[in-house]
Amino acid sequence: MGKRAALAFACLLIAGLVVAGIPARNDPATPVYHYQVVHTYPHDPFAFTEGLAYADGYLIEGTGLNGNSTLRKVNLTTGEIVQERQLAGTYFGEGVAVFGNRTAELTEDSDTGFIYDAGTLVLLGNFSYTTEGWGLTYDGARLIMSDGTDVLHFLDPVSFRELGQVRVQDRNGPVGNLNELEYVNGEIYANVWPTDRIAMISPATGNITGWIDLTGLLPKDEQNLIGWPEIAWLKGRTSIPFREEACLNGIAYDPTGDRLFVTGKLWPELFEIKVVR
């Protein structure tokens, strides 16, 4: 992501160390769940996935990179882009959420979000916020936004006024780098950038009730090689691949079919998974 690509990767997990508030893998305090792959679907390997949702039989996907950011309606089965809106080149697209007949898309550091007609993707307006915009989801009453820290913001879906905040923590302390969000059966699921883990968060307390460990879902060697020459060119980098960016990011839930979908930035596949408890 924009500022994130320039960061030193101090938040990588190394040998049981707790870095940037992310618990080490041997943390005994909070349950760690694993996964079973139910189905695999094609995914655009050049989609720098920043937001993902599921509505009316389609995936709604927001992609990033300045000059390459989009909002898309995607056929789940084929991966075909059915409809697409291109953002102006000054915007770095981020999280998306569908609420009622509208879809909202954040941008990273422009303090601006966009509102679209959910069916047609016609632009209806915009809204502003004072933090960075990373992830977005809807709990049926409020929009929930992440900003890359350990804070989640609750927004009114009509006025976009902030209604409150919650700080996210495990028993080891605050957990930052909260990224793409999805509301699933009363909990907030959050990608923790740039790890292979999803945090399961209580919206009332901010406590993490469990971790979903998706290690091995897409092997690291496949992540590291996906499309980097083209994407590096888009970012103005001609010699050094930014392999770290091709990480897990994107959670969507189909409440009718009780289906959970996950993917990553520049991944060639999207997975329907079942959480194994």
Image (tube, rainbow, N blue to C red):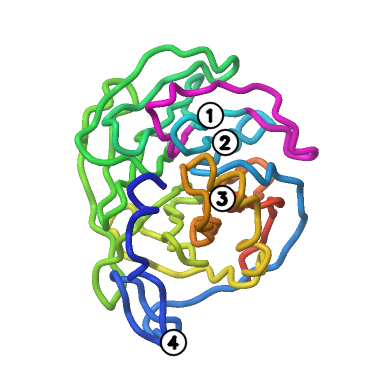
- Whether 115 is drawn above or below 48: the answer is above
Instruction: Name the residue beneath numbered marker 2.
Output: 61
Mark closer to the observer (2, 4): 2
Mark closer to the observer (3, 2): 3
Residue 261 appears in the picture as rendered: no
Question: Decide: marks 2, 4 in contact (CB < 8 A)?
Answer: no
Question: Decide: marks 2, 1 in contact (CB < 8 A)?
Answer: yes
Instruction: Name the residue beneath numbered marker 4.
Output: 26
- For residue 40, what is the image quadrant? bottom right
Q: Amino acid at mark 2?
A: Glu
**Image quarter (top left, top right, bottom left or bottom right) of the C terminus:** bottom right
Question: Decide: marks 3, 4 in contact (CB < 8 A)?
Answer: no
Residue in the picture at 36% in, 76% down: 23
- Write down the region rendered in magenta: 73-97
**Secondary structure of the residue carrying numbered label 2:** strand
- For residue 230, what is the image quadrant? top right
Q: CA distance from mark 2 to mark 1?
A: 8 Å
Q: CA distance from mark 3 to mark 4?
A: 27 Å
Mark closer to the observer (2, 1): 1
Instruction: Name the residue beneath numbered marker 1.
Output: 70
Residue in the picture at 79% in, 40% down: 77
Q: Amino acid at mark 1?
A: Thr
- For residue 167, what is the image quadrant? bottom left
